[in-house]
C-alpha cells in the first residue's frame, strides 16, 4: 500500500504513526494535493491528504476511516478497542478531540495566509478558543495517567501527539507546555517512540528524474 500525504499535515502524521506502530509495510509518498502533478485528486475526489492507496488501486480516505481500516488489519497492537463499546467510544472520542484541534489550527493557518484585510478575526478567535478548551480538557484527563485511554497505547494517543506536534509547527508561540504539565509530559513520552521520531525525520527523496 501507498500513503499519499504531506509532511505538515497532522492527519497524515496520525496515519503514519498507525502504520509505523503496527509495522504495516507501506510506501510513504509526499504528494501535495494542489500541485498539478499530484496523484491525490485522481484518487480522492475531495483532493485531500492523507489518502491511502491499496495494492488493488482502492483509495481510502479520510484519516479516521484509514486508521480504522489499518487497525483492523492486525492485532499487534490493537489501537481501537474491539470488544467494549465504551472503551472504543472513548478512544474514538480522543481521536475526535485531536482531529478537532487539527481542524481549528488549520482554519487559523488558512486565515493567516489570506491578505490581512481579508482575514476574519472573529473566526480566528472562535477556533483559538476551541483549541484552548480542548487542550485544557485533554490535560485534565491526562493528569496522573500515562495513556489517553486504558493502560496501553491507543489511536487516541497517536492522534493527540499529532495534534500537539502540529501546534508546535504552526503556533509555536502557544504556551501549552507551560500551561499544561500533563500534556507536556505526555508529548515528551510519546516523542521518545521510534514511530514519532521516524515521522519527524526528513521524508525519502523522490527518485531522480530520468
Ligand atoms: N478530515 C480529513 C481532513 C484532511 C485534510 O483536511 N487534509 C488537508 C491537509 S492537512 C488537505 O489535504 N487539504 C487540501 C489542500 O491542502 O489542498 C482527514 O481526517 O483526513
Image (cartoon, grey):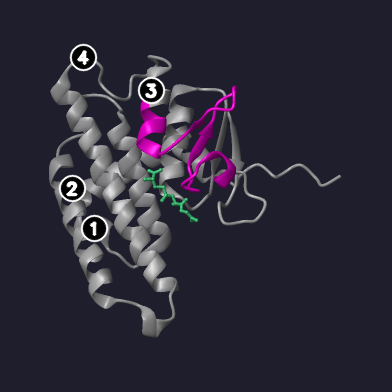
Q: In terms of secondary structure, where does tag 3 sit?
A: helix
Residue 160: image x %, image y %?
30, 43
Label 3: which residue?
71
> Is residue 46 on the magenta stretch?
yes
Mark-to-mark CA distance, 1 and 3: 27 Å
Lower sequence index among marks 3 and 4? 3
Disc on the earlier residue, 2 or 4? 4
The residue carrying pointer 2 sits among few (fewer than 14), some (14 to 19) or many (20 or more) residues within 10 Å by Cα, namely: many
Q: Circle 1 sits on which residue?
A: 131
Residue depicted at 27% across the width and 24% down the height: 152
Residue placed under numbered mark 4 in the picture: 83
Question: Residues in magenta?
Answer: 41-68
Give the spatial CA distance, label 2 vs label 4.
27 Å
Q: Are marks 1 and 2 in contact (CB under 8 Å)?
A: no
Q: Residues within 10 Å of mark 1 (few under 14, many from 20)?
A: many
Q: Earlier in the sequence, mark 1 or mark 3?
A: 3
Residue at x 33%, y 19% (from the top left corner): 78
Q: Nearer the viewer, mark 1 or mark 2?
A: 1
- At label 4, counting other C-alpha atoms closer than 10 Å, the crowd grade (few under 14, some 14-19, many 20 or more) is few
SS for tag 4?
A: loop
Q: Are marks 2 and 3 in contact (CB under 8 Å)?
A: no
Vertical placement of residue 131 versus 144, above or below: below
What's the CA distance linking mark 4 and mark 1? 31 Å
Left or right of 60 on screen, residue 184: left
Whole-angstrom CA distance, mark 3 to mark 4, is 14 Å
Q: Quadrant of the C terminus?
A: top right
Identify the residue at image location x=46%, y=47%.
46
Q: Position of residue 167 (x, y in %)?
A: 35, 57
Instruction: Answer with mark 1 or mark 2, whichever residue precedes in sequence.
Output: 1
**Which residue lies under the disc numbered 2?**
139
Tally the numbered discs.
4
Amino acid at each position: 500500500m501507498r500513503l499519499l500525504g504531506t509532511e505538515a499535515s497532522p492527519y497524515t502524521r496520525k496515519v503514519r504513526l498507525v502504520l509505523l506502530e503496527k509495522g504495516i509495510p507501506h510506501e510513504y509518498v509526499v504528494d501535495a494535493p494542489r500541485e498539478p502533478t499530484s496523484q491525490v485528486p485522481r484518487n480522492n475526489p475531495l483532493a485531500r491528504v492523507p489518502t491511502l492507496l491499496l495494492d488493488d488501486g482502492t483509495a481510502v480516505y479520510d484519516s479516521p476511516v484509514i486508521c480504522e481500516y489499518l487497525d483492523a488489519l492486525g492485532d499487534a497492537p490493537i489501537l481501537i478497542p474491539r470488544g467494549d463499546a465504551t472503551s472504543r467510544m472513548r478512544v474514538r472520542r480522543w481521536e475526535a478531540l485531536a482531529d478537532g484541534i487539527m481542524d481549528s489550527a488549520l482554519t487559523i493557518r488558512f486565515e493567516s495566509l489570506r491578505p490581512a484585510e481579508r482575514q476574519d478575526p472573529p473566526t480566528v478567535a472562535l477556533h483559538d478558543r476551541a483549541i484552548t478548551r480542548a487542550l485544557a480538557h485533554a490535560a485534565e484527563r491526562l493528569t496522573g495517567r500515562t495513556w489517553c485511554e486504558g493502560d496501553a497505547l491507543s489511536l487516541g494517543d497517536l492522534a493527540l501527539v499529532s495534534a500537539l506536534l502540529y501546534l508546535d509547527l504552526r503556533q509555536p508561540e502557544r504556551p501549552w507546555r507551560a500551561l499544561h504539565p500533563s500534556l507536556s509530559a505526555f508529548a515528551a513520552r510519546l516523542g521518545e517512540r521510534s514511530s514519532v521520531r521516524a515521522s519527524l525525520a526528513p521524508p525519502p527523496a523522490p527518485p531522480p528524474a530520468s
